[in-house]
């Protein structure tokens, strides 16, 4: 925990691990869902993180056929656990539902091209799967950090209306925000 005080020591800003990483995870997944992404997960942990029920192999295969038939962007959700959880979106190559010793397979996400353009703040424009995947990688970082409890938050200045200034992927980013955005420090 790092605490920064103003010159009179009457107000402070604290940078520390996020108290509620589950809220950050929920917010990130809700953002993706509200942007039109649909998730189908075979692995129970991944389904829980993505806020969906566990899907059957048959249902996931049907969703893959549907996505391909309708020209939707289709992505794999790969995750696992080895000294902490890891979480990635990648281009869909083939459906694999067998878990390896440290990875969780059989999870997919898809989105329409129209919703993908809006997700990238380019409504009405043509976007590529690679552009969407690049943005999804940023969300995957947030999800992974939230799952592992590695997000940081900036709190303060402490006054009558205590204020939390969001969460950050790393401590340096949070400190930089605290020093630049909070007047009087």
Image: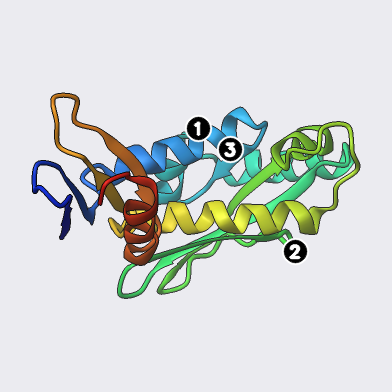
Q: Residue at x 53, y 64 (%)?
A: 98
Q: Residue at x 70, y 56 (%)?
A: 133
Q: Secondary structure at mark 1?
A: helix
Q: CA distance from mark 1 to mark 3?
A: 5 Å
To which residue does mark 3 refer?
A: 32
Q: Is residue 48 shown above or below 1?
A: above
Circles 1 and 2: CB atoms closer than 8 Å: no
Circles 1 and 3: CB atoms closer than 8 Å: yes
Q: Secondary structure at mark 2?
A: loop
Q: Is residue 159 left or right of residue 137?
A: left
Kindly indicate the quadrant of the structure image that contains residue 175: bottom left
Kindly indicate the quadrant of the structure image that contains residue 120: top right
Name the mark on residue 93. Answer: 2
Q: Earlier in the sequence, mark 3 or mark 2?
A: 3
Circles 3 and 2: CB atoms closer than 8 Å: no
Q: Earlier in the sequence, mark 1 or mark 2?
A: 1
Closer to viewer: mark 1 or mark 2: 1
Which x, y percent locates residue 65? Answer: 80, 43
Which x, y percent locates residue 8? Answer: 10, 47
Q: Nearer the viewer, residue 136 or 64?
A: 136
Q: Nearer the viewer, residue 180 or 124?
A: 180
Closer to viewer: mark 3 or mark 2: 3
Q: Is residue 176 left or right of residue 29?
A: left
Which x, y percent locates residue 94? Answer: 73, 62
Q: Quarter of the image containing the N terminus?
A: bottom left
Q: Label 1 crowding class (10 Å Cα cut-off): few <14, some 14-19, many 20+?
A: some
To which residue does mark 1 refer?
A: 30
Q: Nearer the viewer, residue 98 or 34?
A: 34
Q: Nearer the viewer, residue 97 or 112?
A: 112
Q: Is residue 22 shown above or below 162?
A: below
């Amino acid at each position: 925990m790092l605490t920064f005080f103003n010159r009179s020591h009457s107000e402070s800003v604290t940078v520390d691990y996020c108290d509620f990483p589950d809220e950050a995870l929920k917010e990130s997944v809700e953002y993706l869902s509200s942007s039109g992404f649909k998730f189908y997960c075979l692995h129970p942990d991944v389904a829980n993180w993505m806020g969906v029920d566990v899907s059957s192999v048959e249902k996931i295969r049907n969703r893959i056929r549907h996505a391909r038939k309708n020209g939707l962007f289709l992505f794999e959700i790969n995750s696992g656990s080895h000294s902490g959880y890891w979480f990635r979106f990648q281009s869909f190559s083939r459906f694999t539902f067998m878990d390896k010793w440290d990875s969780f397979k059989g999870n997919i996400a898809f989105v329409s091209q129209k919703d993908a353009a809006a997700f990238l703040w380019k409504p009405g424009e043509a976007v590529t799967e690679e552009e969407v995947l690049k943005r999804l990688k940023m969300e995957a970082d947030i999800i992974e950090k939230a799952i592992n409890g590695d997000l940081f938050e900036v709190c303060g200045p402490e006054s009558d209306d205590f204020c939390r200034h969001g969460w950050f992927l790393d401590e340096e980013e949070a400190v930089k925000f605290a020093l630049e955005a909070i007047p009087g420090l």
